[in-house]
Image (cartoon, rainbow, N blue to C red):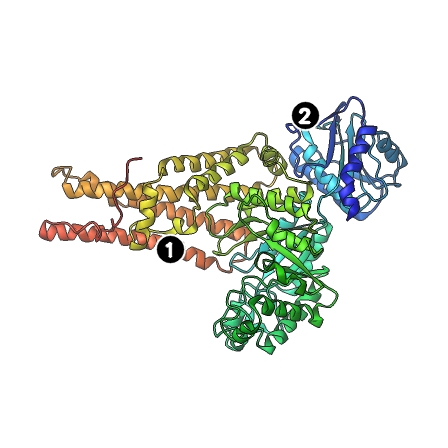
Amino acid sequence: MKFRILLPLLFGGLFAVRAVASAAPVSEGDPLPLVPYPARIELGGDDFRFDARTPVKVSSGEAEDFFAASTLLDELAELYGLPMEVKKSRSGVRRCVTLTRPGCNPQADERLRTAGLDIHAGFDPEGYVLLADAQGVIVSAPTAAGVFYGVQTLRQLVRASDGLCRVPAVRIEDVPAMRYRWQQDDWSRGPIPSLEYAKEQVRILSEYKINGYSIYAENIYESKLHPAINPYGGTITAEEIAELIEYARRYHVEIIPQQQTFGHLHYVLRQERYAALGEKHGSQILSPAEEGSYAFVGDYLGEIVPRFDSEFIHIGCDETFELGRGKSRDAVAESSHADVYLGHLRRVAALPELEGKKLLFWGEIAAEHPEKLDLLPENVIAVAWDYLPRDDFDKFIRPYADRNFPVFVAPGAFYGGRVFPDYHAHLANIRNFVRDGQKYGALGMLDTSWDDMGEDLFDMGWYGAVFAAACAWQRGESDIERYRNAFDWAFYRAPGHAFAEGIVALSDVHREMGPVSFDMAYSSPFSEAGAAQQNRLQNAPSRRMRLLCEEAYTQFCRGEEKALLHRQTIPALRFAARRMDFVFHKAVLASEMSDLYDAFVRDDDKGYAVNTALYDLIMPYASRLGSLRDMTKELKAFHRDLWRYENRPFHWEVVGARYDRMLLEWEMQNDRISLDLQQFGRTGTHLPREEAGFRFDRPAAQ
């Protein structure tokens, strides 16, 4: 660990002594949109220009380096129409792109030494150097992972230029700040990725130097011993895991299992044959007072662990709210909640099925009971987690650092419950948590995504996930503005800032309104439950919020025309903008319907043949109510298609039913108004506004 602390100083001295005189250091506002941003970078000299005839050489001859080259060649062919070829060659560096390792190509080694880019003893195994000038491009690294990461940076450097491609003259020496840079995806709350989409996640994450992908699970890993716990349509087989591991290995991504072993086991404990293992009947946590709890956990882990080749497994153990409220009440009373919790953690950590593994667990106990941390078992690693945009995260990390206890930090790229992630909050959370993790010597970062409401789309979350990848690779406090300026090119290979600006515009809605939740998307303003929310939205600047959403949608559409990479993720952004707009459009339409109902009751048309207020109120294909129905149908179809792209069919019916309930509500509102018409025809009087569905107040002037 010590050489990691000294490495920036060594690099600083290296560049100060050996930097070419004509090369100017890149400033904060430099023009290279790179994510992650390299540890050391200098510009200067003439760019390298090349075409389809330019050779790409792999000096090591290793299959892994040829694979790294293929990620470059695929992009050059697909984005720029350059069908280039790769070959093995241990000599020559002029007018070519060379991927090498120290000692494999003497000419490359000499050119790098002359440029001040030696790979010295103790160089980080994931680090790389990159030299580009008029003579050619050289990427060199001590390992296959380093070569791969150097190529990913090179991919971002390439530009089309006058029918050719060019790479700007640059010198890069780059190493990661954190050894472990992982992304977690929640596979247990509804959206379970298809195997093909999980591969896509791995592939994209690797481009930004993420080296671990963790699958959060509660009951989805296939069990032969306890098959009753597995859901039909949502079970992950051993064969699927093996295929994903093999695929990810080529991209230098480790697949890390995560299985809850304490809380969050409601799916298991609601099976009658396992209910007795719970803290209470119908509980969501295993009871440490039940010896059978450890037999079950040992059985299940004994099936899961051998399927993965990772040295790590995450055993969960968070949010044990029911502990001490049932069978363990006496044990907690005799000692403490923390003592019983840690006793369970020690029992699980000692299971023979976990022998030789490094065990991660959710480490909120540091903030709650730092005085108890000496009771932790030796073979566990704490994962400090929090998803709020705090100025610092010392209280979550420092208790572990003070005891030299290994720790990961776990910020949140996004979490369930919001129509679109609040990236103003998420990016501050990620930046500050990872910064403080580095300050206290954290082993790594486990960036999280959560699907608590069971309907999130991961393709909405790349802006946060890629930023987390950058923060874990970069040292110190990462620059959000630099990331924003680089994102469109680094992720979409698109000029300008259409995507970043659209994402920020949608985040601005949260900043002005507070969290825009799924409940706001699904609620009916004509129901008793939705009336209070409708009043809040009516008295907010709903029309201005709509303009922000529609501008974001327009930006995404225009950006899609220019994007060359990852275009398949853009529809999820467009859907989010459309859905956020719907929240406010729904409020505006309900407000207008209220006014139209009053106009109808007053008979503002004075007996005209067609009552225009009534026409605009409920006419099937021209009215406000018809618009609500049609927008709901559109959102359901849009969401369904995106779901099918990312996920297994499992759970979609639950999400679809929420849209169906809205559609039914619009029909019921039509019936309420029709009932009022019938009463008026019979008695010449109207129903009270509340009975006609208008329980909310008239809107304040906007």
Q: Is residue 70 left or right of residue 58?
A: left
Q: Position of residue 635 (x, y in %)?
A: 42, 47
Q: Position of residue 220 (x, y in %)?
A: 58, 64
Residue at the spot 62% in from the left edge and 35% down from the top edge: 493
Can you see residue 505?
yes
Q: Position of residue 174 (x, y in %)?
A: 75, 38
* Cβ atoms at labels 1 and 2 below 8 Å apart: no
| Dot 1 crowding, Cα within 10 Å, few <14, some 14–19, many 20+ | some
Amino acid tagged 2: Ser
315 to 20, vertically: above or below? below
Residue at the spot 34% in from the left edge and 48% down from the top edge: 533
Q: Earlier in the sequence, mark 1 or mark 2?
A: 2
| Dot 2 crowding, Cα within 10 Å, few <14, some 14–19, many 20+ | few
Q: How much space separates mark 1 and mark 2, taking CA atoms?
A: 51 Å
Q: Position of residue 625 (x, y in %)?
A: 29, 46
Q: Which residue matches tag 2? A: 161
Residue 660, numbered label: 1
Q: Is residue 215 left or right of residue 2?
A: left
Q: Which quadrant holds residue 618?
A: top left
Residue at the spot 65% in from the left edge and 29% down from the top edge: 28
Can you see residue 139?
no
Q: Is residue 438 left or right of residue 540?
A: right
562 to 121, vertically: above or below? above
Amino acid tagged 1: Asp
Q: Which quadrant holds residue 563?
A: top right
Considering the numbered disc 1 on the image, is that residue within a helix, a strand or a loop?
Answer: helix
Q: Quadrant of the C terminus?
A: top left
